[in-house]
Amino acid sequence: MNATTGGVAAVVVAAGRGVRAGGATPKQYRIVRGAPVIRHALSLFIDHPQVTFVQPVIHRDDAATFAEATAGLRLRGAAFGGATRQISVRAGLEALAAEQPRIVLVHDAARPFASPALISRAIAAGAGGAAIPGLGLTDTIKQVDAEGRVVDTLDRGWLRAVQTPQAFLYDGLLAAHRRAAEAGRDDFTDDAALAEWAGMAVTIFAGEAGNMKLTTDEDFVRIAAVDWAALADVRTATGYDVHSFVEGDHVWLGGVRIPHPQALSGHSDADAALHALVDAILGALADGDIGAHFPPTDPQWRGARSEKFLAFAVDRVRQRGGRIAHLDITIVCEAPRIGPHRDAMRARIAEIAGIAIDRVAVKATTNEKLGFIGRREGIAAMATATIRLPAEGP
Ligand code: MG
């Protein structure tokens, strides 16, 4: 047997077609928590201090998708998988033959949420030869026959639901894979089953409930719902702004340029609607106001597009791990007419805020010819922002 160079390798298997999740994109390339599933899964190992080599195994047809999904990651070139998971894992193991790692972890790309602690446990347990993460069962498990009739109730105390990463001494697992291939077997659904067949003793270490496998469309919907529910600190705040009319030929309102026989006076583009909106978002964050972040005395904001201010406020929400749930603006003026521009404003604001257009409302009213607004001396805008931040605990 060759001397091993030591180190820990991770084979991340992503060669399946993921048909169960539906849609044109294989599930391992779908976006979850802001990145493709496979990018999360690979990053788990790239970022783990004990892992030296990360070997992806992909479907030949996915090469371009894979390159895009993993741009910028420090990775070995992908190996191409085969018709079964077992063949794909072997391709990953063979691709590491020159490196001869001491321990190899085999992980399904469809499990993007394993923790660094789980990977550490896998490495420690893998030194014993073959070890897999498992969880006890809480559901009662029935054995059925071909007609769906229950034939037995299994004692769940002796059962474990197993996960990946599964951990092995590299030489042992590679030898077992080669033997299985020679024996004409290519149908083992996990490496532990192959190791058992090869006569290796396989032990269990503690898995993680959060290390779930994303298999169906429902799984993706559930993750999104869980993430949304975790943003349980729901906050609402208002903003208000006024700008006066001066000579000109257009106004900026809600991020849209509207031809008008007057302009609005201000240090920036004087978009009162966006200014009110920015103050509403900053208010929900309890993070000052637009004047504090963009002082009118600062020459760099002269003539600035107010979209910059909105993008800034949106980014402050993101930095807090939050999301914008809803934005609502009321513009008060005798003219220009807002209705024809309403949907353009909503679309622009939604784009800057990174949310769906049905989370942005723009409304308008006149002031019934009363007061400064009624005299067409200026425009007022009010806004309400509802944001969700991560719950801070009890
Ligand atoms: Mg203003």
Image (cartoon, helix red, strand yellow):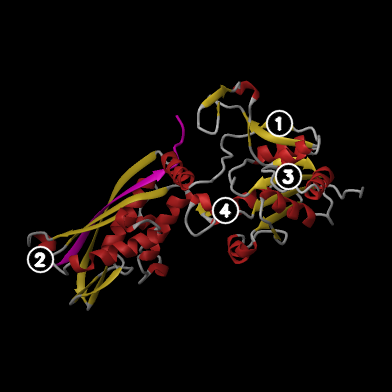
Label 1, ligand 1: CB separation under 8 Å: no
Does residue 393 appear in this view?
yes
Closer to the chain start, of discs 4 and 2, is 4
Question: Image quadrant of residue 91?
Answer: bottom right
Measured from the top left, where is residue 178 in percent x and y? Answer: 81, 49
Near-viewer residue (374 or 29): 29
Q: Within 10 Å of the Cα at label 2, are there few (<14), some (14-19), or many (20+) other Cα atoms?
A: few
Where residue 181 is drawn, which disc sits there?
Answer: none
Residue furthest front as drawn: 147
Callout 3 amino acid:
Leu
Q: Residue at x 67, y 49 (%)?
A: 85
Name above or below for residue 147 compared with residue 291: above
The answer to whether residue 244 is magenta is no
Mark sitting earlier along the chain (3/1): 3
- Name the residue beneath numbered marker 3: 105
Segment colored magenta: 375-394
Q: Are marks 3 and 1 in contact (CB under 8 Å)?
A: no
